[in-house]
Image (cartoon, helix red, strand yellow):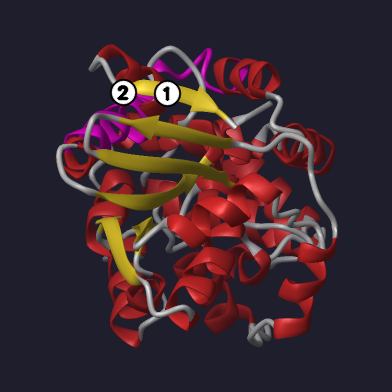
């Protein structure tokens, strides 16, 4: 598994696809309610869902995949019950903010190089590979050559995923966001769009090139590996997800620290006060943030809270 699969858990998908839509004229129509409802007709015996409890408060941690094919989101009975009990839905990012014109403009401003092109930012070997893989996707490289390495990496990954039928309009967090609004629940967010963008835009040139080379080298395996990720997620196979996570970042410890571990720690700081007060909150975050030794789940266990997978 590669870093590209981690993109399935990256909430920048809407902004990136918006940029792709602007550049290449793609259609990003809204999902239909029937597509979401049909996913509820099936049940899963296990799911990426954990209950975290203290003497006062309760959190339900729902692991998500941000892009799915239509009809593949199975809502388990435990997840349904958790949603019904929760007064608040807390996501990585407010989707109204993510899909706003202001966020799209912010992404475009941060994603584009000024007075330079990719040839000025990466080695000749990386550049040649970028041209090869971009044109293999049917995209003219000159239309993307002014993207920063990190934004080109995300753009190519998401373009390929969309071509394979994966779509953020059918992602799990989209489901809970829409259902929460319809039910009149309070909706909150752990991060802002600008913070998420700066996770990438604040990378050094070296780290950005690492990200791009890793993505380019794995595009041909994306379909097989993504299906493996979705299968493990849909069955709540934590051990498999953990192995995928470890393999994904094995050669990229700096990326792992910046994009996963540091964020997990920041989230736990925000979640602890919710456990020290009465109430129930449903926390909806990328599944790969909930597995592994430095996951949100393990960090909360170390804080002394009772944690169990449902």
Q: Is residue 230 visible?
A: yes
Q: Residue at x 50, y 69 (%)?
A: 14
Q: Are marks 2 and 1 in contact (CB under 8 Å)?
A: yes
Q: Is residue 299 above or below residue 114?
A: above
* Element assignment for label 1: strand
Taking the image as shown, residue 62 lies to the left or right of residue 26, namely left
- Where is the N terminus found, in terms of image quarters? top right
Q: Which residue is mark 2?
A: 300
Q: Residue at x 49, y 82 (%)?
A: 182
Q: Position of residue 149 (x, y in %)?
A: 43, 47
Taking the image as shown, residue 289 lies to the left or right of residue 109, namely right
Q: Which residue is mark 1?
A: 307
* Element assignment for label 2: helix
Q: Is residue 65 visible?
A: no
Tell which tag, 2 or 1, sits nearer the viewer: 1
Taking the image as shown, residue 179 lies to the left or right of residue 45, namely left
Q: Position of residue 301 (x, y in %)?
A: 34, 17
Q: Which quarter of the picture shows residue 46?
A: top right
Q: Residue at x 29, y 59 (%)?
A: 189
Q: Position of residue 167 (x, y in %)?
A: 69, 65
> What span is in magenta?
247-269
| Near-viewer residue (247 or 219) | 247
- Where is the C terminus found, in terms of image quarters? top right
């Amino acid at each position: 598994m590669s870093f590209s699969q981690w993109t399935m858990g990256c909430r920048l998908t809407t902004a990136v696809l918006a940029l792709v839509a602007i550049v290449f004229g793609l259609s990003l129509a809204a999902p239909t309610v029937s597509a979401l409802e049909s996913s509820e007709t099936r049940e899963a015996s296990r799911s990426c869902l954990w209950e975290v409890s203290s003497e006062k408060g309760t959190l339900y941690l729902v692991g998500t995949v941000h892009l799915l094919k239509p009809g593949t989101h199975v809502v388990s009975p435990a997840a349904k019950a958790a949603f019904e009990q929760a007064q608040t839905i807390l996501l990585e990012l407010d989707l109204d903010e993510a899909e706003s014109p202001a966020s799209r403009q912010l992404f475009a401003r941060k994603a584009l190089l000024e007075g330079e092109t990719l040839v000025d930012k990466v080695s000749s070997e990386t550049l040649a590979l970028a041209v090869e893989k971009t044109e293999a996707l049917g995209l003219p490289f000159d239309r993307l050559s002014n993207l920063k390495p990190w934004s080109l990496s995300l753009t190519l990954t998401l373009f390929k995923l969309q071509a394979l039928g994966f779509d953020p309009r059918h992602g799990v967090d989209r489901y809970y966001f829409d259902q929460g609004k319809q039910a009149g629940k309070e909706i909150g967010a752990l991060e802002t769009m600008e913070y998420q963008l700066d996770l990438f835009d604040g990378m050094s040139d070296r780290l950005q090139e690492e990200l791009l080379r890793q993505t380019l080298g794995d595009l041909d395996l994306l379909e097989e590996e993504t299906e493996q990720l979705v299968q493990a997620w849909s069955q709540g196979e934590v051990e498999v997800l953990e192995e995928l996570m470890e393999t994904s970042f094995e050669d990229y410890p700096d990326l792992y620290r910046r994009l996963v571990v540091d964020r997990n720690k920041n989230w736990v700081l925000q979640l602890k006060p919710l456990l020290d007060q009465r109430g129930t909150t449903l926390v909806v975050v990328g599944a790969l943030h909930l597995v592994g030794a430095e996951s949100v789940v393990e960090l909360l266990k170390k804080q002394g809270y009772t944690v169990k997978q449902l």
